[in-house]
Image: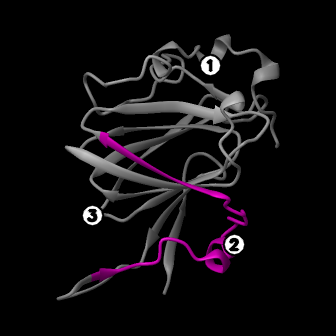
Amino acid sequence: MAMNYSKTTLPGVLLIEPDVFKDDRGFFLETYHQKRYSDEGIAKSFVQDNRSHSTRNVLRGLHFQLRNPQAKLVYVTMGEIFDVAVDIRRGSPTFGKWEGVYLSSENNRQIFIPEGFAHGFCVLSDTADVLYKCSDLYNPDDEFGVLWSDPAIGIEWPVAEPIISPKDGQYPLLGEITDDLLPSYPL
């Protein structure tokens, strides 16, 4: 089995397209293979798996942890999302830049987002189930975020009226976050 790994405009962020084997019974694919991923530079030990179920137009993010940074491997098992990574590493040549990819249960794509990036997504289908592996445990005391609609970042979200949690709607703009609350480049 093979997978196609593509670099994105953000160093370290990878788009992964697994081989899908289909027949009259359905399909089979590997969602993770430690050696193959490691050979492509994803040498992470994932310690937590998360599942998010959301309805159309829900937008989650942009989230990150500072002292317990999480790399994430994200994929969709039902529906479609637009998934976004934002480089928030102060001193990075791509600081404040973003990459967005469409992930769905139809295209079976994955995105790998390394530590030092904020992450978010919006749901484009009636519902979506998003699974993601994390390289560190969730720590509510270490949860931070960037406002999803920060005009300086300029993410082109493909939803006209996103549904956002009160917490996500109150995160600061990236330019308002003090250096001590952002990861450094390189990590």
Q: Mark number for residue 38?
A: 2
Amino acid under disc 1: Leu
Residue 5 painted magenta = no
Residue 48 painted magenta = yes
Q: Tell me how far mark 3 sits from mark 1, CA to CA.
A: 33 Å
**Label 3 vs 1, first from the N-terminus:** 3
Front one among 162 and 142? 142
Q: Is mark 2 on a helix, strand or loop?
A: helix
Where residue 142 appears, as percent x and y from the top left, is 71, 31
**What residue does disc 3 label?**
106
Seen at 79% across and 30% down, the residue is: 91
Seen at 38% across and 30% down, the residue is: 156
Amino acid under disc 3: Glu
9 to the left or right of 66: left
Seen at 54% across and 17% down, the residue is: 152
Q: Mark number for residue 174?
A: 1
Where residue 134 appears, as percent x and y from the top left, is 62, 53
Q: Mark number for residue 118?
A: none
29 to the left or right of 4: left
Q: Is mark 1 on a helix, strand or loop?
A: helix
